Amino acid sequence: MSLGIYSRFLRRGGPHSPTIIDGMPIIPSAGEGHMVTSGGSLAQAVRGARSGDAIFVAPGQYDELITIDKSLTIVGLGGRGAAFVERDTALAEGMLVTADDVTLINIGVAGASGADYSLKVAADRFRAYQCKLEGNEAAGGAQLLLAGAGDLLLSDCEVCWGVNGILALAGGPDPSTQIFVDRCRFHNLSAVHVSDGANSFNNIQLVDSVFDKAEDGTEPTDYLLIDSASSFGLVTGCRFAIATNASAKLTIGAGIMWISNATEAGWSTARPA
């Protein structure tokens, strides 16, 4: 069916009640539209779709591994994360992206306890807007595990409730390039919020994002651990829940520019010490 049948989901509801994707990119109309109702199968909808299609997902929990092996746009309806891929089986991962040009909008993804990841991206040109990534993954896992060459954007997303936030996969493509994180919120992560792991990031940009403690006041082991000699990019406009930037929890290599970020001491252009 034509995407036009779903146009009611995409319109503004007036100046004081924008839709969930207000300000988001216009969804391409070249493909077909598919609707997953509550209690349905998102995995089945992905299998039945073709590259270029859009899938709209009703609020609800989808306890299934979602493997996206074609270029799709997946839109969750309702509040942030109301359409949630959430695994209940121990060690079960949430979503694996293996196709280029995949876009997620307002989707929640959570791996189960002990899983290697909530979301793994092993492809290029991935985009996520207003998504929520969480889950009690394994010690070496991550909410977002990068296993692709790059060109990845997270915009207005929440990364929380687990061990690691964004982590480059050991043995994956090195470097991962064009990693853009804009207006995101990191919290309740016990290990590290963003790390290049054993690899490196080229053109990583952390912009206008918040890096907070756990709800009990516990700080992570590291907020940033981007210390490869081959990593370069910038951190700007970000806020960190620590006293000053003279902290070992902010570890960046010489190729990462530190451009006016904030701690409790205020805004500073001084590099972390």
Image: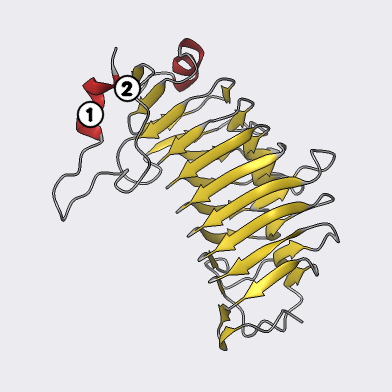
Q: Earlier in the sequence, mark 2 or mark 1?
A: 1
**Residue type at the position of mark 1:** Ser
Q: Residue at x 34, y 36 (%)?
A: 26
Q: Is residue 272 above or below residue 86?
A: below
Residue 86 visible here: yes
- For numbered disc 1, what is the local secondary structure? helix
Looking at the picture, the colour scheme in use is secondary structure
217 and 130: which is toward the camera:
130
Viewport quadrant of the C terminus: bottom right
- For numbered disc 2, what is the local secondary structure? loop
Q: 10 Å neighbourhood of mark 1: few (<14), some, or many (≥20)? A: few
- The residue indicated by pointer 1 is 7
Q: In screen coordinates, is 13 left or right of 181?
A: left
**Residue type at the position of mark 2:** Thr
Give percent across and percent down for residue 59. 33, 34
189 and 91: which is toward the camera:
189
Residue mark closest to the camera, 2 vs 1: 1
